[in-house]
Amino acid sequence: MPKPTDIPSFAATQLTLLDAELQAELAETNALLSSHTPAALSRAGLAILNLNVSSIRTGLGGKTVVELGLDPAVVGKGDKADIPEHGIRVGDIVAVQDQPAGSAKKSEKRDLAKKGVEGVVLRLRRENIEIILDKEDADVPSGGKLWLVKLANDITYKRMNQTMGNLKKLSDQDYTPFMRVLFGQGSPSPLPSDLNDPSNPLHKLEWNDPSLNDSQQEAIRFALASREIALIHGPPGTGKTHTLIELILQLLKQKLRLLVCGPSNISVDNIVERLASHKVSMIRLGHPARLLPSVLNHSLDVLTRTSEAAALVQDIRKEMDDKQASIRKTRNAKERRQVYTDLKELRKEFRERERGCVDNLIRGSKVVLATLHGAGGFHLKGQEFDVVIVDEASQALEAQCWVPLLWVKASKLVLAGDHLQLPPTIKSLNSKEAKAAKKATEKKDGKDHGAASNGDGNIDAVKPVAPSMTLETTLFDRLLALHGPCIKRMLTTQYRMHENIMQFPSAELYDSKLIAADAVKHRLLKDLPYKVEDTDDTREPIVFLDTQGGDFPEKTEDEGIKKGSKGMSLGDSKSNEGEAALVKLHVNQLTEAGVKAEDIAVVTPYNAQVALLSGMLKEAYPGIEVGSVDGFQGREKEAVMVSLVRSNADGEVGFLGEKRRLNVAMTRPKRHLCVVGDSETVGRGSQFLKAWMDFLEEHADLRYPNISDTYADEAGAG
Ligand SMILES: Nc1ncnc2c1ncn2[C@@H]1O[C@H](COP(=O)(O)OP(=O)(O)OP(=O)(O)O)[C@@H](O)[C@H]1O
């Protein structure tokens, strides 16, 4: 029996950690907003200037939706101008406010982010942007020019906080047997002993997908047989989602009701799209603006419009829109107040009718899909599901997983993920508050918890971790540490990489259990289905450009605020110009041989290197993808180049030392992996890095580029 976790103290630690994380996020945003002018924020993609309200309407939930377009005075009369490029995305939280005149004092400009109305970006088009306002009676600034600025997003934290607050308040008799298993206060029910016996009915399942491999079939049987929890461990390219789809179909055959979640909209939509091809009737909860167009037909929004009850809701919607329009026409304060009062009434009525319609739809649905966050909306409160399934579970914070688990009634959980790839991004990892919380947990547990949660170990092999050591410890990690490998099944055939590319990660991280599917194990660039020449590069699955010797040194840069960078990070980053030049040369050789630029990706752990490489490659090789390792998780390309950047006399490798990041980097390619790095520096970083450098030396096509040739050749490339 595992050591049981005290649930209230688990929840309390989570609350402290979540708060530290929110503070870190707020501090980062505030630092940005207070130290930059609107013009600078706009250049960094975090704000849009010179806007006007072009229309106002009523959206889902009776909320006010404001559409903003460029101010005609700026664009020129009659022209419809595109909004300049920006980094604001659907779902971002923004403030809309009067734009300071160019002549306004600096301090006045800086204060702006605190005033105005707040809302969420609903839709982005080339020439306008729609914002759904938070407050029902918010008065949209209407006079002069407006600007819009991105704020810190605290919505998801609020829901996680609420969830952990609720968990903390539960008393012993509130804990279900299922919950007790999740906290080690009970063990998972034993599996039927004959699960491996071919005469077990689970061996006579009729598969919808006859191509499922043995490990996938076994994982499905295991998940069907498990009573409380089942973990499906899917290393890169092993068909985790593929397996979940079959599992869902099998569970539906058993007439069970399912809630299927993922941490991101895209992870959920991916499943909806694949289920749709099996003609499964389902409901996708979530804001239509955030869903893939192909998924919209299953969205609640569309279903409430197309179902019978919808007509009732539409009437009121129209009436509300008319009222909204009339507010803007009247300047009389008394009349405006009256319209607001009417709107309030209408909104109430609208919501009641909408709720009735939505409730019927959801209750009648056997599969409901939503993000973990979205599953905590009022629609699902208290509803019963037989199984909750979470895809990409190692990308979700534990508190996020508890949103559906506490909100609905469920007695079984299936998690699919890979704890050996990157966990969710945490900003407060080293903050004072986070360290204090961590210390407190350690003290309580009175022992060293091994290296599991700092990414330094294969979780299977180490001692149990404390339940809430850091925010980075996911539910997947914790359950594995709590109950051991008996609660999981691993998928072992991978359908992505050439077998040489797979070899190192398999040996170091997956107990040498990975097998390359026949269709992929010998695939090279020269065999691409279009014409590619057979060259030294296109016939090699792995090339290592080893820059050892100190001629390709790293450089520390102040990143500033960068367009397109994930989040809004400030501070130091590393770059390496010599490596970037080598990357360009290699890309040139690949494209000269006929490899299409869109089949090539360049990834690197450092934002400054991403920026440098983007500048050098994007124009010369349209279609090429350049990005951070973290941002490329879940993706794949025919050819992937990895620029390691670090090259210094001290053997400093920074966050290259995180093996889950390296795992992601080296498992993205299908046919060709080219690593660019200094084996001397990198090999001193960790045992894992040393082993990788040794592996590359032995198994890659090893090349020692020369700095002067690099620059001479680079001048001719691209
Ligand atoms: N049994 C199978 N036979 C043939 N191809 C398969 C099989 N299972 C999965 N695949 C293929 O492998 C690829 C990866 O599958 P899928 O997208 O489900 O993987 P995933 O594990 O969810 O992704 P990731 O590797 O990013 O975690 C897909 O192209 C899929 O068609």
Image (cartoon, rainbow, N blue to C red):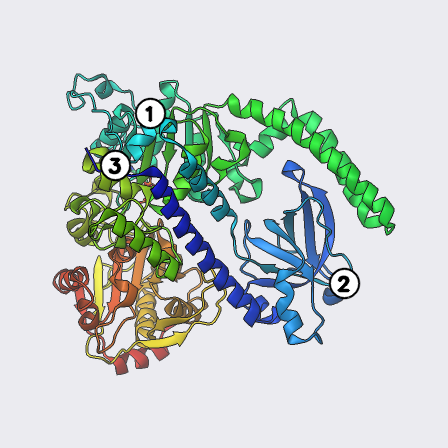
Disc with the residue nearer the chain's start (1 vs 3): 3
How far apart marks 2 and 3 lie (CA) works out to 61 Å
Residue 30 shown left or right of residue 585 in the figure: right
Q: Which picture quadrant has residue 233?
A: top left
Indicate if the residue with disc 3 has its beta carbon within 8 Å of ligand 1: no
Residue under pointer 2: 144
In the image, what residue type sits under mark 3? Pro
Q: Residues within 10 Å of mark 3 (few under 14, many from 20)?
A: some
| Type of amino acid at the residue the image marks with label 1 | Asn
Tell me which numbered mark, 2 or 1, is placed earlier along the sequence.
2
In the rendered image, residue 117, in percent from the top left (x then y), is placed at 66, 54
Would you say residue 279 is visible in this rendering? yes
Q: Nearer the viewer, mark 1 or mark 3?
A: 3
Vertical position of residue 383 compared to residue 240: above or below: above
Write down which quadrant ligand 1 falls in.
top left
The correct choice, above or below, for 334 with respect to 113 in the image is above
Q: Nearer the viewer, residue 598 or 426?
A: 426
Q: Is residue 57 left or right of residue 715?
A: right
Residue denoted by label 3 = 4
Quadrant (top left, top right, bottom left, bottom right) of the N terminus: top left
- Furthest residue in direction left, as rendered: 698
Q: Quadrant of the C terminus?
A: bottom left
